[in-house]
Amino acid sequence: MPHPARDTVTLHDVAAAAGVSLATASRVLGASSRTVAPEFRERVLAAAERLRYTADASARAMRQVSDSLALVADDVTTPSMAIVVSAMERAASTTGAFVTVSATHGDPGRQLETIRRVRALRPRALVLTSGRVDADAVAGGLLAELRAYEHDGGRVVIVGDTDLPFHSVGFDNHRAAARLGRYVADTGHRRVVVVAGGRGEAAPAARTAGFVEGLRAGGVAESAVRIVHCPVSREGGYEVAHRLAAEGLRGTDAILAVNDLIAVGALRALREAEVAVPDDVSLTGFDDIGAAVNVTPRLTTVALPLAYAGTEAIRLALGEPGAVTHVTVEGRLVVRDSTRERAATAG
Amino acid sequence: MPHPARDTVTLHDVAAAAGVSLATASRVLGASSRTVAPEFRERVLAAAERLRYTADASARAMRQVSDSLALVADDVTTPSMAIVVSAMERAASTTGAFVTVSATHGDPGRQLETIRRVRALRPRALVLTSGRVDADAVAGGLLAELRAYEHDGGRVVIVGDTDLPFHSVGFDNHRAAARLGRYVADTGHRRVVVVAGGRGEAAPAARTAGFVEGLRAGGVAESAVRIVHCPVSREGGYEVAHRLAAEGLRGTDAILAVNDLIAVGALRALREAEVAVPDDVSLTGFDDIGAAVNVTPRLTTVALPLAYAGTEAIRLALGEPGAVTHVTVEGRLVVRDSTRERAATAG
DNA sequence: TAGGTGGTGGAATACGTTTTCCGACAGATC
DNA sequence: GATCTGTCGGAAAACGTATTCCACCACCTA
């Protein structure tokens, strides 16, 4: 057969049913500047409704700019990402745009491949959310690919911290962490362990640095801050805290985890070791994921305005062209039950 | 300007660069059955690579069947949905399909509107995941819309329980709940409260019925099972358990929540009321969300193979045409720390 | 050597929409 | 009453790709 593709009702059908020309039907149904006589307009509208006509997005995209937005994420499963996705979808749908999501499942190699694949959609914008959109990936050709995409008229928005010359919505990990560190110091803690996650990961590193700065500003001696690394997961936190408890706390009165997942794991290990939180030791997280209020005691942590970040990303993706802008959103300190004030004992 | 749309490199450009005709270039780059001479083939490939050519999905979709899949969900934010989305994305990407997600944010009215909007993409399949794709929605014209879509050659897959005549991947809520009920009965519990969620919601109702059946089969008197309703949320569970504790447990030795969220809320209330779980009362959830292992004690619950369900949905969506099939996936009982065996005291 | 045959490149067309251009008609102005 | 102006419907072109059809060439066979 000559065209095995589809069998849907087209604008031709609507025009024929309404007894008008293709052009007139298009003018009524599309967002045209031309006016058509009320009589014709109504006839077209009626026919379209009757036939359940929906304009083909593909065909439309060939004449106009596409109305799809591509989201390329490391992993859509994490709660934070889910929130961002949801916010993006909501923002996009108000402007009639479609959101297509692709996940790289953490493999930077797949990241490049995924972007190349997604480029086929000629999406109006490409939103990249990844923990590490940095050096190694860039070396792999990512930057070149993104530049090529931009050169084709697309727009790149990165959610997360990045040095790359694209629009971005970043989280001020350092400052928020510093605020939390300062709070911990101000509430009388003097011997702190920072559970810093993996080495070389951007966000954990920024948070760790922030913690240290805040603690120092609050009067905690640098020598009294111990930094330990672990996988960024519940298990990682569990292992670290387990080890810590086994070797004895030795005066440690606060444990600052680089995210909630780690903190939750640590909490479990501490409980098993019969170390009371917050009475024996205070514990904090970062991110304010759902689990932070599910556990007991509820976690003192930093809430990230993820939904806002998602909306902001879409705003950048859809906004007027202009200079590259880096939006930074601020985390908010949320004090709950896993920390308490300590009597100010000497050092 | 005549065509303000885009400025990308097209097949024309590649053909010109390779010094061959459009047709030849298409044959090399597309999945054509025709063979082209090695020399030409190589020239085309080289040109395409050099120019970073990617075929335009829109244009391609106009000749062939579209390679996009539409996912319409109530809410992408819930952990379960995130897992399903992720699995779908993974399955789809192996076949080169694109997944576009839309959320209705729980409003059935928006559901119809969303589907209509998404139909513009002429997606090969429409995957609908919603707690309630039922009577009221159907009355609103949903069924007619889906039928129209199917008539156009699309395929509808529903994730969740449904009576609608479309492919579906359902969870056997009833049986899994019965198994859990049976387990609770067999471990010696004799006075049970079922926290049943909202009235009239399909999944909660099926689970409640399953609980009751399993309990009865295990020897729990029907009069010893109390069913209470509440919003399906952590807060809902909290309220219920708070009230329960306030009025005294009166011999209740097990609380069966219709999902983990409710159970987690209940757990908190019980802890505040100084009711020990599982020593004073056993508590169970359903879904096995991440929170189930974050809380202490970790929740005994039913794990749903969500990732499998997502993959299965894509299989149905992409598979050969055939009779409408309803796939049912089984939940798995996961016994953890929030339940314990009771001495068999006379009820 | 002539005619047939298989293989392969190229021109042209179709997909469904938007948009430009043209022509027709009505109303207004002198 | 004639010309100009403005409004609006319709024909046609264009977007980028896949495919059909045609033409050409080389090779093989009789």
Image (spheres, coloured by chain):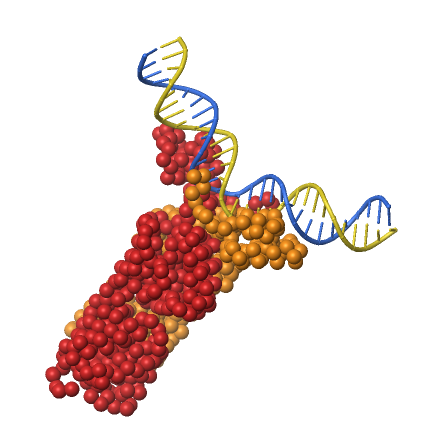
Chain colours: A orange, B red, C yellow, D blue
Q: Which residue is rendered at x = 36% and y = 31% of the image? A: B35
Q: Quarter of the image containing the C terminus of chain B?
A: bottom left
In the image, residue A4 above or below residue A43: above
Q: Which residue is rendered at x = 40% and y = 61% of the image? A: B72
Q: Which residue is rendered at x = 57% and y = 58% of the image? A: A46
Residue A101 vs residue A42, the one in the foreground? A42
Q: Which residue is rendered at x = 16% and y = 73% of the image? A: A247
| Residue B223 % position (x, y) | 22, 85
| Residue A300 % position (x, y) | 33, 77
| Residue A164 % position (x, y) | 42, 55
Q: Quarter of the image containing the N terminus of chain B?
A: top right
Residue B281 vs residue A71, the one in the foreground? B281
In the image, residue B73 above or below residue A279: above
Query: As drawn, is D6 to the left or to the right of B56?
Result: right
| Residue A5 % position (x, y) | 43, 45
Q: Is residue A300 something that shows in the picture?
A: no
Q: Is residue A260 something that shows in the picture?
A: yes
In the image, residue B152 above or below residue B206: above
Instruction: Determine the image quadrant of residue B86.
Output: bottom left
Count the labels in the image.
Answer: 0
Residue A166 vs residue B319, the one in the foreground? B319
Instruction: Determine the image quadrant of residue C7.
Output: top left
Instruction: Determine the image quadrant of residue A189.
Output: bottom left
Query: As drawn, is C29 to the left or to the right of A138?
Result: right
